[in-house]
Image (spheres, rainbow, N blue to C red):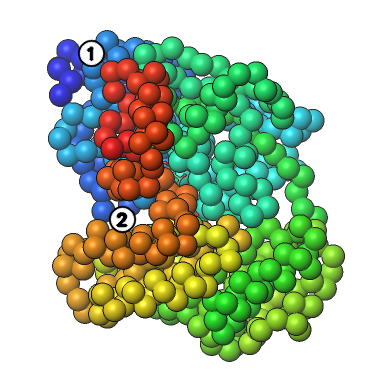
Amino acid sequence: MPTQETILQLIKVVGEAHAITNLEDMSPYTTEWRGLWTGKTPLVLRPASTDEVARIMAIASATGTRIVPQGGHTGLVGGGTPTDNGEEVVLSLSRLNRVREVDAEDLSMTVEAGCTLQSVQAIAEKAGLLFPLSLASEGSCQIGGNLASNAGGLNVLAYGNARDLCLGLEVVLADGRVWNGLRKLRKDNTGYDLKNLFIGSEGTLGVITAAVLKLFPRPKTVETALFAVPSATAAIALFNALKSASNSSLTACELLPDIGMEFTARHFGLRNPVATQAPWYVLAELSDATPGVLEKVFGTCDVSDAVIAQSEQQRVEIWDLREKLSESQKPEGGSIKHDISVPVSRIALFIEQASQAVTAAFPGARPVCFGHIGDGNLHFNVSQPVGADKQVFLDQWEAMNDVVFALVKKHSGSISAEHGIGRLKRHRMTEIKSTVELDLMRSMKAAFDPHGILNPGRVLP
Ligand SMILES: Cc1cc2nc3c(=O)[nH]c(=O)nc-3n(C[C@H](O)[C@H](O)[C@H](O)COP(=O)(O)OP(=O)(O)OC[C@H]3O[C@@H](n4cnc5c(N)ncnc54)[C@H](O)[C@@H]3O)c2cc1C
């Protein structure tokens, strides 16, 4: 627990107006949006500059104060929520929200960690360019959080994960030193790749304060379609057909289940534009494609019906169905999540086996499986049986994970495709990583954060 003297020292860095000590104002920083992760902290610090972050970390290092970096607090694995022992100080990056540069010539922009993803997309658009990272949480999540968790999202298929979209970083180290790696280079083979160590480290190795992001030309045409398909196998066949017919212009390919359509209709009043009801739907988006690709696959694949958006409004409505899927599970009661990936060729078999295994072991449980089929990334979420007790259902979280993860393993997949490990899956690391891999990771942690003050108890077992 930080002493009163340390707390006063820390408050002095940001000024009283930007330090939160009362319980009510702290709640967005101590409880995540679903209420699943909640904790306690003596102090939330809201610095406005890299220098202030550096001074905070220098004090933390000297006093052994534990620090939890926090962006938009939309992470789903408990990484950015303080624990309930009241010992961790929350370091919110949201006031570091300046755009330092937009460089249209080098197709890059330099932004501070607290810029929301949506604001970065909007600034790129204003410059006539594209920043392609896109997640349903983009209105709240921040670039620092996106990079710390190596976020994936809707356009990975064409543009890669957050890691692939970052050229350089500025990071405050655990001892308060600043590493300025804000380079714009597309090629730089000069020693160990520090940037890629910080990306995906979930706040355990350093505090990201700014980043150079890659920009792209904006596509001149975008076509969006929603296909109704009779099975997950048909969905994968459709994905493969779209990929080969579209000549690299397939920029998103999402799988949606019928039960998800039911949830989004019930809780958000969204209308499924496809007239024919089907067990599965595929949302596909093409950018700058040769005309006629969507019509061609409709004619040749096992598709029962489809709509092609005829206006931007219709495109937004189709995407809304996908983006509201996560939230629409909340009013249905407890939901046990599995953010997994398997090779694309195994998706259909995995869904069939996992659905059977889960419903056999947990009668009445309702799989709501959706995701980024182009990346083999499924959100195999399971909603509680209708009318069941929410807490009794959620108490089966680990037991259900065991069932699903056994199949992930069987299909050579990953138990965390894009959300990270955080606190949620930390105990699983010994099941999925070898001793050698864990030893290397622990050595890295010791080198970057020798006093273990940055996000302790996250990622590493
Ligand atoms: C509706 C919804 C949909 C989502 N969809 C997707 C999706 O499609 N793909 C996907 O990948 N994720 C998705 N997520 C998860 C989440 O939005 C992402 O992980 C996002 O990148 C987290 O950003 P954040 O700013 O909210 O980070 P936070 O939740 O604040 O933090 C996440 C982790 O990063 C650390 N951290 C935060 N900022 C910094 C920093 N500046 N320096 C160092 N460490 C830091 C935290 O300590 C924590 O461990 C979704 C979440 C929701 C709620």
* Residue type, mark 2 in image: Arg
Residue 453 is left or right of residue 421, and the answer is: left
- Residue in the image at 15% along x and 35% along y: 85
Residue ID for mark 1: 63
State which quadrant residue 177 falls in. Answer: top left
Image spot of residue 50 (x, y percent): 46, 19
Residue ID for mark 2: 34
Does the Cβ of the disc 2 residue fall within 8 Å of ligand 1? yes
Instruction: Check contact, mark 1 vs mark 2: CB within 8 A.
Output: no
Q: Nearer the N terminus, badge 1 or badge 2?
A: 2
At label 1, counting other C-alpha atoms closer than 10 Å, the crowd grade (few under 14, some 14-19, many 20 or more) is some
Ligand 1 picture quarter? top left
Q: Secondary structure at mark 2?
A: loop
- Residue in the image at 71% along x and 61% along y: 250
Image spot of residue 143 (x, y percent): 51, 37
The quadrant of the image that shows the N terminus is top left
Q: Nearer the viewer, residue 342 or 57?
A: 342
Is residue 18 positioned above or below 367 on the image? above
